[in-house]
């Protein structure tokens, strides 16, 4: 009686769900704090009292209101969406490939998006000028998104035989298609003029600058769709960590799981690369640190990654805006400075792999 | 419980399974033996629904295997694969709990703890699986399979346990321990299908033997000394000296290197 009562109350050894729930809540709190910070801090400071008044719906000084509405709020929203989208698609990719170093960059979403973006920058001033003129500021994001999605679908079709996707084939095909995309990018850069070259360089470094409500609304549905898949893929990805056959033994419809995850990743990382350029390593760093804290169970890892990714990107962006003010550091530099050492640490601490 | 009729499965041009009919009965331990490449593991994958036969039919309880979704199957059978490679650092408890959740258990934490106890790893729940020895990891995976089908037979509906060479990384004590747990599962109404290499373990634990060679069913039946002697000579090409252990009456096989008399 007492034993039964006790065992129902105490968590069994090795159960990390309580800590995982706490860390997820803490990540959410951190994301909110980072959001407030990113609204308050900038080349022109906004008084926290004014900020609170604005958020509470009270009238504030016109200058502060314009800064908040035209600049800070869209930028904060874009940063949160992009950070969440990148971190969740990283965590999902790692689960899908059963490899903590996997990243949307690996399967060609980023390379495809980059090639399409560079092509858009170069050809937008030439043969595609009428289309570019028609689409205005949507031209580049749309091109990058289409390029990323096309590459992912192409890779998926190539690597799928008889309804099954071989992870090895997918990764190797990703490398091949990535090289091809790199060559095409080089070709476009070779033919670019000086103005296009400057645009390409800026885009490839990644930035949240130029965030507008339009861009936010362009990314929102893609990231929201990817986040909405979390409850449906979390248990399947846990099963997949044991192996594809084992996941099937545990009742997971493996092929359906793969399709949903690939679509979610292509949607969220393709769309985010499109509006902000290449911001690297968020998809590796955030899930890795969270896995150390709460374990690899995807039920908490995926939502915690969304909050953690949003927090990391907002904090990094705030740093970018203040360190060289009034100029801005491209955010891709900051995330790479944080991310590359973490990536190396994972690589060097990996246990030696068994054959097969 | 599971009946396969005239199964065939090709890998490329090779017939890995060629016209095999076999049954895995509830309440019994069915053991598949045979030389390397005989098709034992392939037969296990076919019967457990992991791969689909090119021809032939499999009845699973009152259903046709092909009509069961992965989720349906997960509540009816569990599988212990030859070797599981884990991608991320789960704890032992988390691994076994995955099985309990897949089996639809209402209290997966308690089932996971009970099954770890059953395989002799009671205090191991909090350890990370990659920090355990190969044999301990194998027993954790066995506990996970057991947690998926904690009740061998529920209101006359039996569950099945598929074990693919479960003893390969275990010491003698744990080989016997694991197979005893599996036999208990059968005695309580479940169906057990095991692929084994060790003829003596097969002799001790099998109620029914399936002897495969070259993808065909060479012979089947209860493990008798006469059967073992024939198998050792005709399938493995060794001089079989099968006799009965005086105490238990179990056939015992001591193969010799040459077939010269």
Image: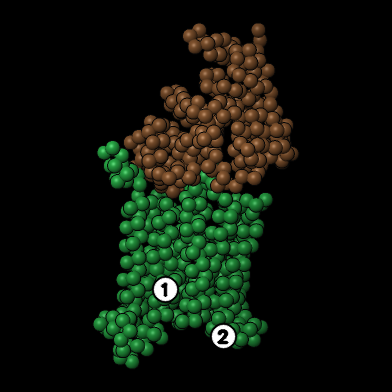
Chain colours: A green, B brown
Spot occupied by residue B201 in the image (x, y as percentages of width and height): 52, 21
Residue shown at 61% from the left, 36% from the top? B61
Q: Is residue A238 left or right of residue A326?
A: right
Q: Is residue B36 left or right of residue A76?
A: right
Q: CA distance from mark 1 to mark 2?
A: 22 Å
Q: Is A75 or B4 nearer to us in this picture?
A: B4
For label 1, the residue is A79
For label 2, the residue is A136
Upstream in the sequence, badge 1 or badge 2?
Answer: 1
Q: Is residue A111 left or right of residue A328?
A: right
Residue shown at 59% from the left, 53% from the top? A255
Q: Is B11 or A338 nearer to us in this picture?
A: B11
Residue shown at 59% from the left, 28% from the top? B25
Residue shown at 31% from the left, 79% from the top? A41
Is residue A287 placed above or below A246 in the rendered structure?
A: below
Spot occupied by residue A186 in the image (x, y as percentages of width and height): 59, 71
Spot occupied by residue A274 in the image (x, y as percentages of width and height): 52, 74
Q: Where is the C terminus of chain A found, in terms of image quarters? A: top right
Q: Do callouts 1 and 2 mark residues in contact (Cβ within 8 Å)?
A: no
**In which quadrant of the rendered view does residue A182 lie?**
bottom right
């Amino acid at each position: 009686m007492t034993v039964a009562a006790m065992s129902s109350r105490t968590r069994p050894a090795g159960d990390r769900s309580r800590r995982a729930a706490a860390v997820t809540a803490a990540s959410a709190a951190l994301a909110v704090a980072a959001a407030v910070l990113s609204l308050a801090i900038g080349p022109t400071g906004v008084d926290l009292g004014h900020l609170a008044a604005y958020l509470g719906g009270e009238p504030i000084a016109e200058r502060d209101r314009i800064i908040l509405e035209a600049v800070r709020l869209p930028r904060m929203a874009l940063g949160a969406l992009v950070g969440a989208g990148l971190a969740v698609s990283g965590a999902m990719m790692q689960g899908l490939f059963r490899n903590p170093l996997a990243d949307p960059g690996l399967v060609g979403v980023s390379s495809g998006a980059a090639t399409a973006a560079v092509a858009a920058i170069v050809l937008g001033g030439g043969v595609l000028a009428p289309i570019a003129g028609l689409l205005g500021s949507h031209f580049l994001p749309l091109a990058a998104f289409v390029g990323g999605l096309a590459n992912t679908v192409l890779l998926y079709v190539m690597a799928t035989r008889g309804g099954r996707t071989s992870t090895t084939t997918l990764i190797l095909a990703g490398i091949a298609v990535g090289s091809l995309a790199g060559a095409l990018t080089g070709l476009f850069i070779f033919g670019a003029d000086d103005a296009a070259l400057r645009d390409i360089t800026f885009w490839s470094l990644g930035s949240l600058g130029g965030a507008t409500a339009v861009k936010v609304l362009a990314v929102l549905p893609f990231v929201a769709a990817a986040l909405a898949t979390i409850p449906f893929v979390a248990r399947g990805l846990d099963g997949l960590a044991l192996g594809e056959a084992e996941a099937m033994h545990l009742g997971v419809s493996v092929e359906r799981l793969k399709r949903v995850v690939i679509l979610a990743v292509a949607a969220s990382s393709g769309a985010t690369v499109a509006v902000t350029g290449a911001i690297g390593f968020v998809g590796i760093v955030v899930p890795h640190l969270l896995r150390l804290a709460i374990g690899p169970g995807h039920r908490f890892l995926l939502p915690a990654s969304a909050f953690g990714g949003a927090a990391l990107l907002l904090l990094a962006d705030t740093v970018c805006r203040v360190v060289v003010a009034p100029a801005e550091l491209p955010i891709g530099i900051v995330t790479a400075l944080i991310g590359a050492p973490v990536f190396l640490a994972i690589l060097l601490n990996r246990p030696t792999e068994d054959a097969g | 419980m599971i009946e396969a009729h005239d199964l065939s499965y090709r890998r490329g041009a090779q017939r890995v399974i060629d016209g095999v009919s076999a049954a895995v009965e509830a309440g019994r331990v069915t053991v598949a033996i045979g030389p390397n490449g005989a098709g034992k593991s392939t037969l296990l994958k076919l019967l457990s629904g992991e791969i689909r036969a090119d021809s032939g039919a499999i009845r699973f309880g009152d259903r046709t295997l092909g009509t069961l979704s992965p989720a349906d199957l997960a509540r009816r059978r569990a599988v212990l694969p030859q070797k599981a490679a884990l991608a991320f650092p789960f704890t032992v408890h988390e691994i076994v709990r995955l099985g309990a959740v897949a089996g639809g258990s209402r209290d997966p934490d308690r089932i996971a703890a009970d099954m770890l106890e059953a395989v002799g790893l009671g205090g191991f729940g909090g350890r990370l699986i990659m920090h355990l020895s190969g044999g301990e990891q194998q027993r954790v995976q066995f506990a996970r399979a057991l947690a998926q089908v904690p009740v061998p037979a529920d209101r006359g509906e039996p569950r099945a346990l598929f074990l693919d060479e479960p003893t390969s990384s275990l010491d003698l004590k744990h080989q016997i321990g694991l197979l005893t747990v599996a036999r208990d599962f059968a005695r309580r109404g479940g169906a057990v299908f095991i692929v084994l290499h060790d003829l003596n373990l097969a002799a001790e634990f099998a109620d029914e033997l399936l002897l495969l060679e070259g993808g065909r069913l060479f012979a089947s039946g209860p493990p008798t000394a006469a059967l073992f002697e024939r198998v050792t000579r005709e399938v493995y090409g060794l001089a079989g000296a099968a006799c009965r252990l005086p105490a238990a009456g179990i056939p015992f096989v001591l193969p010799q290197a040459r077939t010269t008399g």
